[in-house]
Image (cartoon, rainbow, N blue to C red):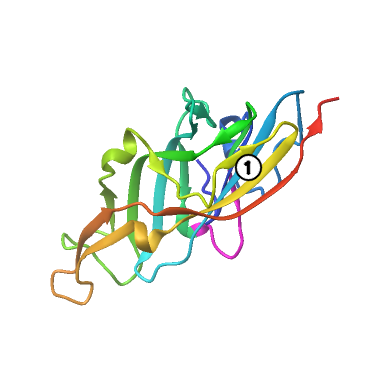
């Protein structure tokens, strides 16, 4: 699956997000119209570079809003693969595009199924390899809570656009010493995902 860039977009505008997985490099919403009585949300993910990593790949199988567990991704579709270190310099990747019921949502959660870190040259893990899978823990069950600035007011006839920062340097804590004789043992996954921007526009009615 192609990789997106260091910003991810979770549009809650239509459940066509997974059908559009190969289009996650786009910054424009996949749809600009909706049915009467609907609202929409667009969510983008961003990050910053790392000195020790060549790639930081994560798979996301689910994104949902609370209350009501409103899914933003098709739960029957394959998980989406993102290399967070490719999402740099303002590049954005679409994660979700879904219509949703107008309501006030106080939580956004992302379910991360797996993660894998490949080290940059000349660094090596203590076993001589350059790539290791990272243990996810509870992020595979309940999902990772995104720190929101305030509740999401999904008003009828509007599109809410959000940017969230999946902080690689904070989320992956290095174990070991890259300058030591044994090198890097691995990483502990302590996810830090925070909202960094939000805006709203009008959802155009479907023809």
Q: Assign a secondary structure to mark 1.
A: strand
Which residue is located at x 45 percent, y 50 percent? 147
Quadrant of the drawing holding the C terminus: top right
Q: Residue furthest bottom?
A: 179
On the rendered structure, is 55 left or right of 104?
A: left
- Residue 200, horizontal then vertical, whole percent: 71, 46
The residue carrying mark 1 is 42
Q: Residue furthest left?
A: 181
Looking at the image, is 60 positioned above or below residue 25?
above
Which residue is located at x 77 percent, y 23 percent? 36
Looking at the image, is 106 positioned above or below residue 199?
above
Rate crowding at label 1 as few (under 14), some (14 to 19) or many (20 or more) other CA atoms within 10 Å.
many
**Between 36 and 31, the one nearer to me in the picture:** 36
Q: Which residues are magenta?
A: 86-94
Determine which quarter of the picture holds residue 156. top right
Q: Residue 89 magenta-drawn?
A: yes
Q: Main secondary structure of the magenta part?
A: loop
- Residue 140, horizontal then vertical, whole percent: 33, 36
On the rendered structure, is 193 left or right of 153?
A: left
- Residue 64, horizontal then vertical, whole percent: 49, 33
Q: Is residue 158 visible?
A: yes
Determine which quarter of the picture holds residue 184. bottom left
In this figure, what is the number of numbered marks?
1
- Residue 15, horizontal then vertical, whole percent: 60, 27
Looking at the image, is 76 positioned above or below residue 154?
above
Q: Is residue 54 visible?
A: no
Which residue is located at x 28 percent, y 48 percent? 133
């Amino acid at each position: 699956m192609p990789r997106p860039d260091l910003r991810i977009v979770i549009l809650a505008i239509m459940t066509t997000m997974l059908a559009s997985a190969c289009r996650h490099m786009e910054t424009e919403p996949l749809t600009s119209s909706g049915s009467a009585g609907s609202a929409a949300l667009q969510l983008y993910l961003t990050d910053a570079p790392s000195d020790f990593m060549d790639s930081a790949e994560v798979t996301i199988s689910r994104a949902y809003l609370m209350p009501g567990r409103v899914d933003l991704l098709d739960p029957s579709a394959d998980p989406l693969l993102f290399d967070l270190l490719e999402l740099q310099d303002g590049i954005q990747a679409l994660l979700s595009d879904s219509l949703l019921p107008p309501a006030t949502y106080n939580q956004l959660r992302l379910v991360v199924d797996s993660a894998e870190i490949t080290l940059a040259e000349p660094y090596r893990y203590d076993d001589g390899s350059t790539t290791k899978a990272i243990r996810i823990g509870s992020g595979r069950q309940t999902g990772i809570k995104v720190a929101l600035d305030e509740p999401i007011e999904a008003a009828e006839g509007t599109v809410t656009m959000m940017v969230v920062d999946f902080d690689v340097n904070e989320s992956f804590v290095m174990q070991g010493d890259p300058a030591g004789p044994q090198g890097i043992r691995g990483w502990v996954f302590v996810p830090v995902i925070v909202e960094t921007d939000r805006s709203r526009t009008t959802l155009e009615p479907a023809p």
